[in-house]
Image (spheres, rainbow, N blue to C red):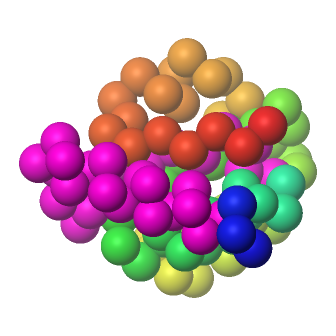
Amino acid sequence: SYTIATAVEGARRGAELMDTPMDEAKVAIVGAAGSIGRTCALMLAHDAASVTLIGRSVEKLAPVRAEVEARNGHVSVTSDIAAGLSDADVIITVT
C-alpha cells in the first residue's frame, strides 16, 4: 500500500509541478494488469481526464478497464507501450 500511495502522490505532485491539472491530464499506467497498477489506475480514474492501461495482454487488462470505466468513462487499453505513452501527461510504471 505504501508503494501505491507514493506512486499516486508522486504522479499528482509531478502534474502539479508541470502545471498540468489532473482533471485535464492523460494518465498512462504501465503494468496496469497487476495489483499495484490496477489500484493506481482506480485511484486516479476519477481525477484524470483519461486513463490508458498498458500491459502485455489486452485480455488481462479487460477487468481493470471495466473497473476504471465504472469510475471514469475515459479509458483505453493497449499492449503497445510506445502508443500508450505517446500523448500521456502523467506516467506511472509498475512493472
Q: Is residue 29 left or right of residue 32?
A: left
Q: Is residue 35 visible?
A: yes
Vertical relation: 5 (above or below) 58: below
Q: Which image quadrant: the C terminus?
A: top right
Q: Position of residue 39 (x, y in %)?
A: 69, 69
In screen coordinates, is 1 left or right of 51?
right
Q: Please state the horizontal and vertical placement of residue 55, each as a whole percent of the image.
A: 76, 37
**23 relative position to 10: left or right:** left
Toward the viewer: 17 or 78? 17
Which residue appears farthest toward the left when viewing the image? 19
Picture residue at 34% right of the left edge, 29% below the top: 87
Residue nearest the viewer, comparing 31 with 57: 31
Q: Is residue 30 on the magenta stretch?
A: yes
Q: Quadrant location of the N terminus?
A: bottom right
Vertically, is 84 above or below 38? above
> Which residue is farthest top?
82
Horizontally, residue 30 falls left or right of residue 16, namely right
Residue 84 lies, in percent from the top left, at 53, 30
Q: Is residue 50 above or below residue 86?
A: below
Q: Which residues are magenta?
A: 4-33
Can see residue 66?
Answer: no
Count of all numbered marks drawn on residues in the image: 0
Residue at 87% across / 47% down in the picture? 59
Tell me the residue at 56%/44% (across/down): 92
Residue at point 11%, 48% (across, down): 19
User: Does the stretch in magenta take in 94?
Assistant: no
Residue 37 drawn at (x, y percent): 71, 56
